[in-house]
Image: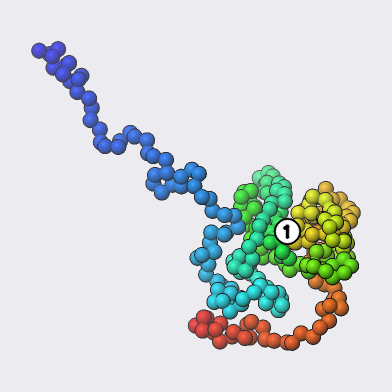
Amino acid sequence: MADTTTAAQADQKPTRAFGAGQRPQRGAGGAPQRGGPRPQRGGQGETKSWTPVTKLGRLVSLGLIKNIHEIYLFSLPIKEYQIIDKFLSLKDEVMKIVPVQKQTRAGQRTRFKAFVVVGDHNGHVGLGVKCAKEVATAISGAIVAAKLSVIPVRRGYWGNKLGAPHTVPTKVTGKCGSVAVRLVPAPRGTGIVAARVPKKLLQFAGVDDVYTSSRGKTRTMGNFVMATFFAITKTFAYLTPDLWREVKLIKTPYQEHSAKLAEKSQ
């Protein structure tokens, strides 16, 4: 009789709650599934929920400023990268990521320094540098810094003024550290005669033909790219005769839309 009871107990399998001990499906519980869309770098996904905090940002969000050149005309400082995203469609490229160290009492602290170039290949280019503990944080911060430093690039002609502007208007020079970069106008069809680093920056700026000359320690890529950026910045520094025309003075956007700004602040 005892043997029969023991065999019956052995045949019975222990019951357990539904789902206990089972592996959860991948992606359950709100976790992102593999292969799904990733957020873009540089805070692109936050553009829809942008709440402006500056006067210029409020004017842009209200649609009172139609073009980014209205901002450049009055040299208004841009403090929010969403303003650039609203007017320009920029592409970005990481030029270099270099580890940097600082000696502390606890030892060496290593961080990563990222150099990022942004541009639309049509007269706008920016350069950003950011240092952070993580590589991804450094890249995203450098993209934001590059967007905030976007500048207009003035283009001109070599020889006859036929067709669209294709080269730099004058000879310009930029210097950073020991590196000096000189840009010289070139005939149409020449292309960009430059090393890899300045060539990428000039392509993002929309310059088609140019000669370049560099001297100094160009192996220091950070100084090399910054010297090229400083040279491009100087394209609007020379007042050539075609800029001598009279420009009618108008009110700044802050003065023109002061009533709207007062309503928004209240």
Residue 207: in sight, yes or no? Answer: yes
Residue 15: % across, % down = 23, 30
Q: Residue at x 30, y 36 (%)?
A: 20
Q: Is residue 81 left or right of residue 180?
A: left
Circle 1 residues within 10 Å: few <14, some 14–19, many ≥20: many
Question: Does residue 205 appear to the left or right of 53 in the view shown?
Answer: right
Q: Place residue 149 in its image quadrant.
A: bottom right
**Is the residue 36 above or below the residue 42 in the image?**
above
Indicate whether 110 appears above or below 78.
above
The N terminus: image quadrant: top left
Residue 84, image x, y percentages? 63, 67
Question: Nearest the camera: 233 or 247?
Answer: 247
Percent of width and height locating residue 135? 64, 48
What residue is at 70 percent from the left and 48 percent from the top? 97
Q: Residue at 19% across / 23% down in the picture?
A: 12
Residue type (three-letter) at the residue carrying disc 1: Phe
Give above or below for 166 relative to 21: below
Q: Nearer the viewer, residue 170 or 18?
A: 170
Number of labelled discs? 1
Q: Is residue 133 left or right of residue 187?
A: left
- Quarter-wise, where is residue 16 in the image? top left
Most distant residue in the left direction: 1
Q: Nearer the viewer, residue 161 or 77?
A: 161
Residue at the image point whose x is 56% and y is 76% from the top: 63
Residue bearing the label numbered 1 = 204
Work out whether residue 103 can be spotted: no
Instruction: Provide the secondary structure element on which disc 1 rests.
Output: helix
The percent coordinates of residue 44 (x first, y second) are: 57, 59
Which residue is at the front of the view, 42 or 208? 208
